[in-house]
Image (cartoon, helix red, strand yellow):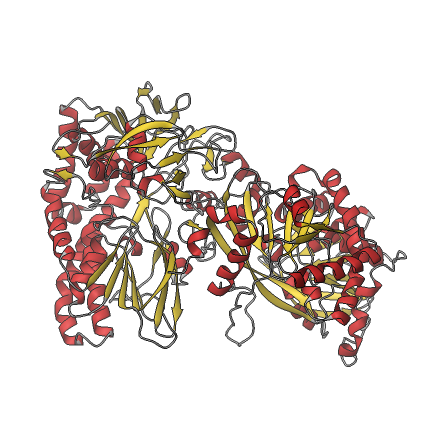
């Protein structure tokens, strides 16, 4: 949940995560935007179980998602260290499949 | 009193598989391993099952290519061997034989492929030329730059690490003894056989047997020195790369006739990219290649290898590279395997050199027959006898 | 960069935390310094800054952060420093002119060269496997702190903390300040054990009495706010369907929560020292620390190490080491005379020694049970990336005595994180790291990199 104590966030923007519109603020990481909307799963493991992020500092690799932005080729990025951008499309899971 | 009938030096794929075939026939076998199974090339290998003639055989002129085509007889045996291994050793070895493509991107490439296919067909291999459209129908991820390919249904891949361990377990099940962290430091001829001085974690031990198998991969040349032999096996360091796991996008083994490339999607989902790009071996204090140190990755090889892969299979560029590693394997003086008894050292056998994953289980089966004095001539073309001139002044006097 | 030409930088500092900042401040007149960090803004993890797009009043206002913030401000105003944020370092290798660093940012991978390189890459939370720990909502305490500090987000409505390291008290307090609810803070150790450890180091405890008091006060404030603080209650597992719903602790009922944060200690980030071939030795409670001399020189010419990289010991020690490294580099470059460096070193060495003593106390207090008395259930995942369970590892350990052999047999350590989260657990199962047990072979790339980036020419 976002804190509202003593903070003025950047402008609001919308990103999509697995086809779902997710509210975000400029400067937030993809991970923040997802967690703020109670989306905790970033991928599924070999047994199909959902997995969340663990370290939140780019070390564990659990939060790797596929990110597309207008016109650019898709990228596999760590959600915890990647800031949201306008019209960003995020797909969780490996490749194109959640 | 012998320690065993056969002492196998090296617990990689070839050593473990040979030990298994020997114990299956009732022999008493000990495997002596300096580190642990899969510590060498067996553990660094990408697991290609390539039965088509490799690019490396084609890039040094027609005469050598003709000579190299003699390997086709083994390749055909290997296809049958691999088909049977999943039943014999279980599903964990992940044998996946759904086809392989050797691609061409230029007209020169295409011509080379055509000549290759002619040789292969003459050698009894069922490869065939297909055009770009059929290539992309078989492997939809391949790019438009691929003009044609040679296709062989039997090609594919398996898991080398699992395979070594499966053979090791099967050999142990048959009574073979595996000694890990044991290093052979001396060899002497002894009555009716050989005595090996072995350094073990519990102190030095002498082991004797009438037959020795040198299956030590990149170290085989050095082991040969212990027997006062020249075994023309040269260590070479290669680069391998793996992507993160992804959903199934590539079912076939991909190789390239004009460039160094070998690509496959492993059972776990990672895409393995290699093909023979060089890495740099380190030197030890004595100035020799240090086979115990990881070889150094060359950035030129990294970029070169990934560039070919991305050009031929574009979607791989969207994936993260998670690891690049180097592995040291051995090539012989004429690129063909070195398998068989060394004439100047009766009872000493060697099995190493090139394509030792694809052909390893086949070497093991045939070599075991030779070792047990069963009639077996299919390895003759790979015999160390072809290098006898190197050992005219070598070998050890027998006791 | 063309062969034989001047390197791009005089010094490349990898890591913009307290150690890297202190090094730059101590470098003095060195003209071209690059500071490279995966985070977008400097600060390291301890001062993980909010984005510029946020304006935050009273960010990390506590007195304990003041010196750190002053140093950060001084660093950010250094003219000679080129800040390369959002940039992952994939590897570094020796070249004739010094070191060549391969980096990757959002646009592509490139190489940059420097005469000297300082590795100050900090540490990360030590992951300990527990049943249910792979459920979404389980995080490291450091990860929770990062959300609170730099994103103003409490990553859960009811967050339970468990572990052995007192830092979890600070993390809990920060969550509360951000408006979140802390379900509990649970220590595996009995309070008596913690007290005895402190009493067993009376000098260190006395000279750091203000820190100890601060920790105790934190605990009391949390308690006063209604947060249960437990001692002697080790975490046994996490429960939930598809996400965290409760934390099971020793000797008591399940704690309902929607996020579980574990705090067992920290490991030095050792990917770069190991891929560079620098000498490392086993660190406590796990991982590898880079070896160095009195001026923070590492085992290869032109390479230096500082901060948590040389052993986890906190921000004060990190800053002292960073400054020593800066002096060492300046000396080695001929910019600072030996006697000038020798004059400036003693307060830094004293600060470092002081901080080291406290770190040792903290280590002894926080030492987790890497191998808890109770065995992990066989289906507990140890390697998160490849779903390798404790049972898989025990099976492999029946015939393997070598970490690499286990890796090859089970795939443990072959995933995206390349063993950062499981190597220490595997080593613990084998009896611990040592010179004879050197862990996995660290390889390029130190961080995942998109293949297209490696092929971009920029």
Above-or-below relation of A54 to C201: above
Question: In the rendered picture of this protein, how many numbered marks are placed on residues?
Answer: 0
B285 sits to left or right of C35: right
Quadrant assignment for the C terminus of chain C = bottom left
Viewer-nearest residue: C374 or C247: C247
B348 sits to left or right of C40: right
Query: Residue C297 is drawn in which quadrant?
Result: bottom left
Of all residues, the one furthest to the right in this rendering is: B375
Question: In the rendering, at what x and y percent does residue B284 appear?
Answer: 52, 72
Residue at point 24%, 27% (across, down): A1
Quadrant assignment for the N terminus of chain C = bottom left
Above-or-below relation of B53 to B394: above
Look at the image and tell me whether residue B154 can be seen.
yes
Of all residues, the one furthest to the top in this rendering is: C253
Query: Residue C185 is drawn in which quadrant?
Result: top left
C8 sits to left or right of C449: left
Question: In the rendering, at what x and y percent does residue B88 appear?
Answer: 75, 40
Look at the image and tell me whether residue B365 can be seen.
no
Question: In the rendering, at what x and y percent does residue C441 appear?
Answer: 47, 55
Viewer-nearest residue: B38 or C69: C69
Query: Residue A43 is drawn in which quadrant?
Result: top left
Question: In the rendering, at what x and y percent does residue B106 appear?
Answer: 63, 60
Viewer-nearest residue: B103 or C384: B103
C63 sits to left or right of C358: left
């Amino acid at each position: 949940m976002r804190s509202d104590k003593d903070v003025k966030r950047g402008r609001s923007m919308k990103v999509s995560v697995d086809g779902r519109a997710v509210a975000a603020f400029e400067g937030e990481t993809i991970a923040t935007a997802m967690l703020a909307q109670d989306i905790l799963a970033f991928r599924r493991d070999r047994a199909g179980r959902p997995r969340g992020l663990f370290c939140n500092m780019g070390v564990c690799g659990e939060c790797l998602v596929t990110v597309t932005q207008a016109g650019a080729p898709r990228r596999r990025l760590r959600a915890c260290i990647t800031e949201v951008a306008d019209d960003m499309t995020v797909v969780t899971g490996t490749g194109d499949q959640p | 009193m012998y320690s065993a009938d056969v002492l196998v030096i090296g617990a990689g794929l070839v050593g473990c598989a040979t030990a298994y075939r020997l114990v299956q026939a009732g022999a008493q076998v000990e495997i002596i391993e300096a580190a642990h199974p899969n510590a060498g090339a067996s553990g660094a290998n990408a697991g290609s099952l390539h039965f088509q003639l490799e690019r490396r055989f084609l890039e040094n002129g027609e005469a050598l290519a003709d000579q190299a085509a003699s390997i086709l007889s083994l390749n055909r045996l290997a296809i049958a061997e691999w088909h049977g291994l999943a039943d014999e050793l279980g599903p964990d070895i992940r044998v996946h034989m759904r086809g392989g493509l050797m691609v061409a991107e230029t007209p020169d490439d295409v011509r080379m492929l055509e000549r290759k296919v002619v040789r292969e067909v003459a050698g009894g291999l069922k490869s065939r030329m297909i055009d770009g459209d059929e290539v992309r129908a078989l492997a939809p991820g391949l790019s438009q730059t691929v003009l044609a390919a040679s296709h062989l249904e039997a090609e594919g891949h398996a898991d080398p690490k699992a395979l070594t361990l499966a053979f090791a377990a099967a050999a142990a099940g048959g009574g073979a003894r595996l000694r890990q962290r044991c290093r052979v430091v001396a060899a002497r001829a002894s009555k009716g056989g050989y005595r090996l001085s072995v350094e073990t974690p519990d102190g030095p031990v002498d082991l004797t047997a009438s037959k020795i198998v040198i299956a030590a991969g990149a170290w085989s040349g050095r082991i040969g020195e212990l027997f006062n032999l020249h075994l023309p096996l040269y260590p070479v360091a290669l680069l391998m790369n793996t992507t993160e796991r992804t959903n199934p996008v590539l079912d076939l083994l991909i190789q390239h006739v004009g460039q160094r490339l070998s690509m496959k999607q492993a059972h776990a989902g990672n895409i393995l990219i290699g093909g023979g790009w060089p890495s740099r071996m380190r030197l030890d204090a004595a100035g020799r290649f240090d086979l115990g140190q990881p070889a150094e990755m060359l950035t030129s090889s990294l970029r070169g290898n990934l560039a070919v892969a991305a050009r031929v299979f574009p979607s791989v560029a969207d994936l993260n590279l998670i690891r690049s590693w180097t592995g040291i394997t051995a090539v012989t003086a004429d690129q063909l395997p070195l398998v068989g008894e060394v004439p100047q050292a009766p009872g000493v056998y060697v099995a190493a050199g090139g394509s030792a994953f694809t052909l390893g289980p086949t070497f093991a089966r045939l070599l075991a027959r030779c070792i047990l004095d069963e009639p077996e001539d299919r390895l003759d073309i790979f015999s160390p006898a072809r290098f006898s001139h190197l050992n005219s002044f070598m070998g050890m006097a027998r006791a | 960069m063309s062969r034989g030409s001047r390197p791009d930088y005089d010094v490349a500092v990898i890591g913009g935390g307290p150690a890297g900042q202190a090094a730059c401040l101590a470098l003095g007149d060195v003209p071209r310094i690059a500071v490279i960090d995966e985070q977008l803004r400097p600060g390291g993890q301890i001062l993980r800054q909010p984005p510029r797009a946020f304006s935050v009043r009273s960010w990390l206002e506590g007195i304990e952060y003041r010196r750190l913030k002053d140093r950060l401000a001084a660093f950010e105003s250094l003219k000679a420093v080129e800040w390369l944020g959002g940039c992952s370092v994939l590897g570094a290798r020796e070249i004739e002119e010094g070191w060549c660093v391969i980096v990757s940012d959002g646009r592509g991978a490139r190489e940059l060269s420097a005469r000297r390189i300082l590795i100050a890459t900090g540490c990360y939370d030590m992951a300990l496997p527990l049943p249910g720990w792979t459920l979404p909502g389980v995080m490291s305490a450091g990860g929770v702190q990062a959300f609170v500090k730099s994103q103003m987000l409490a990553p859960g409505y009811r967050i339970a903390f468990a572990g052995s390291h007192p830092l979890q008290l600070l993390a809990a307090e920060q969550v509360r300040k951000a408006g979140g609810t802390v379900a509990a803070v649970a220590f595996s150790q009995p309070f008596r054990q913690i007290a005895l450890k402190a009493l067993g180091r009376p000098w260190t405890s006395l000279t750091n009495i203000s820190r100890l008091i601060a920790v105790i006060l934190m605990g009391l404030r949390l308690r006063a706010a209604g947060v249960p603080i437990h001692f002697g209650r080790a975490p046994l597992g996490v429960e939930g369907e598809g996400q965290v719903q409760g934390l099971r602790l020793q000797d008591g009922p399940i704690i309902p929560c929607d996020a579980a944060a574990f705090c067992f200690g920290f490991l030095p980030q050792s990917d770069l020292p190991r891929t560079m071939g620098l000498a490392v030795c086993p660190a406590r409670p796990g991982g590898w620390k880079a070896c160095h001399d009195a001026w923070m020189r590492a085992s290869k010419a032109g390479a230096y190490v500082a901060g948590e990289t040389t052993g986890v010991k906190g921000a004060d020690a990190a800053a002292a080491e960073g400054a020593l490294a800066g002096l060492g580099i300046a000396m080695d470059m001929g910019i600072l005379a030996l006697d000038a460096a020798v004059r400036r070193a003693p307060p830094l060495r004293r600060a470092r020694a002081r901080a080291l003593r406290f770190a040792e106390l903290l280590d002894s207090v926080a030492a987790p049970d890497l191998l808890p008395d109770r065995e992990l259930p066989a289906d507990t995942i140890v390697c998160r990336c490849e779903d390798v369970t404790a049972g898989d590892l025990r099976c492999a350990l029946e015939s393997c005595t070598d970490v690499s052999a286990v890796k090859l047999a089970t795939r443990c350590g072959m995933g995206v994180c390349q063993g950062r989260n499981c190597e220490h657990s595997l080593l613990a199962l084998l009896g611990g790291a040592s010179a004879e047990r050197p862990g996995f072979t660290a390889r390029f790339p130190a961080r995942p990199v998109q293949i297209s980036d490696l092929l971009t020419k920029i």
